[in-house]
Image: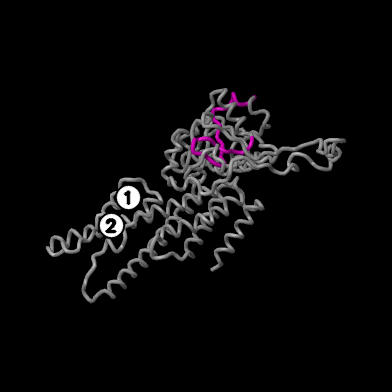
Amino acid sequence: MPDVHSLVNEFTIKLKKRKIEGSKTTAKQTAELLRSVISQQRIPHTNQAAALIDAVKAVGEQLIAANPVELAVGNIVRRVLHIIREEDLSLATAAIGGLSLSAASDDEDDAEQDDHPVLSAAAVAAAARSTLRPPSLQTLLEDVPYSAAVPHNSSSGGDSEGKSKSADKSSRSRKLKHNVIEAVNELISDIATCHEQIAEQAVEHIHQNEVILTLGSSRTVMEFLCAAKEKKRSFRVFVAEGAPRYQGHVLAKELVARGLQTTVITDSAVFAMISRVNMVIVGAHAVMANGGVIAPVGLNMVALAAQRHSVPFVVLAGIHKLCPLYPHNPEVLLNELKSPSELLDFGEFSDCMDFGSGSGSPLLHVVNPAFDYVPPKLVSLFITDTGGHNPSYMYRLITDYYSADDMVVQRRPAF
């Protein structure tokens, strides 16, 4: 099995060089890497969850720093941290429940049990805190001391009891890793099938003879539209080309190949054509905790046009794109500048690159941002693998997948 450090370094280099792009691909490979980290991690007999959390956080900080724009990396790191906490809490609750049942049974069978109670006051208090408060790292670390939870015998069987304790701890350690890895496998499967689950809802939102507008290229949008076509829905699609990368051309060819009536328009024609449209359906790079969307550049213009003409603006996003951070957090990098060569050919504009006589700076500057931020007030509906949700509900949905302690893995200073 490859060394985990070499796997992390290799993945970090790919992120830095932008060899891995796209939320789905990045999320899936991040989850697979963290699964390898967990499987190869040696954990002590005590505080197993804390050891796994520290290992995942250390790797997560490296991955997030390698490419902060790919928010899916941080999302998956936080999801895995949440999984570890949930699985450890489940095991701790089951252990306390088993000891409580054992204590009740022994009390009924043997009155001499009063000389050495099974559960101490500290154990009962820890159990109460675990059930009354939401799971967090502090709650999990308040685990019941094993020596307080298990009765001590003064007989000569002390050595065998010690071996039994050690075996139980080792068994719980293996059980925790096994459960976490199984949960991560389910997460990877959910990421791989999110397009299919979103596409299954297409027939509920796209109706006969409608006109749908989208911008750029999104596999989720393509599968969504094609799923409606397969359900015998007849509709037309306007595709804004998505300059300067012109991903809309790619989407248009794929839609035509699947038998959909498609019209390609320029980005500047969106406002002129929006009055003919029944619905705007787009993908997303990430969905923030406030319901805002980080999306391909140009979508904020489309959202404003849709609002002006009262056209529903629908965003398709898998659960792995839900980010538990707000856009104003200092650790969130909202944009990235792409190569100027996508806009201008250097050979044709080389004469404009001459430096000014006194300023020492080039006369021509090229800015090529990759993303837009669409505020939640411009979004009509989110469609995820769990169904359709309003922007105001996204924070509630996010709390189901992330713990409060996982909201910030890495904090950078604000500039």
How far is disc 1 from disc 2 in space, using C-alphas? 11 Å
Q: Is residue 369 magenta?
A: no
Residue 209 visible in rendering: no
Query: Vertical placement of 327 versus 164: above or below?
Result: above
Which quadrant holds residue 147? bottom left
Q: Amino acid at mark 2?
A: Ile
Q: Please state which of residues 131 and 335 is positioned toward the viewer in this rendering.
A: 131
Residue at numbered disc 1: 130
Name the quadrant of the C terminus.
Answer: top right
Residue at numbered disc 2: 96
Specify few, some or many for label 1: CA neighbours under 10 Å numbering under 14, 14-19, or 20 or more.
many
- First in sequence, mark 1 or 2: give its number: 2
Name the quadrant of the N terminus.
Answer: bottom right
Q: Are marks 1 and 2 in contact (CB under 8 Å)?
A: yes
Q: Amino acid at mark 1?
A: Ser
Q: Is residue 281 magenta?
A: yes
Q: Secondary structure at mark 1?
A: helix
Q: Secondary structure at mark 2?
A: helix
Q: Which residues are magenta?
A: 272-297
- Give left or right: position of 274 versus 153: right
Q: How many marks?
A: 2
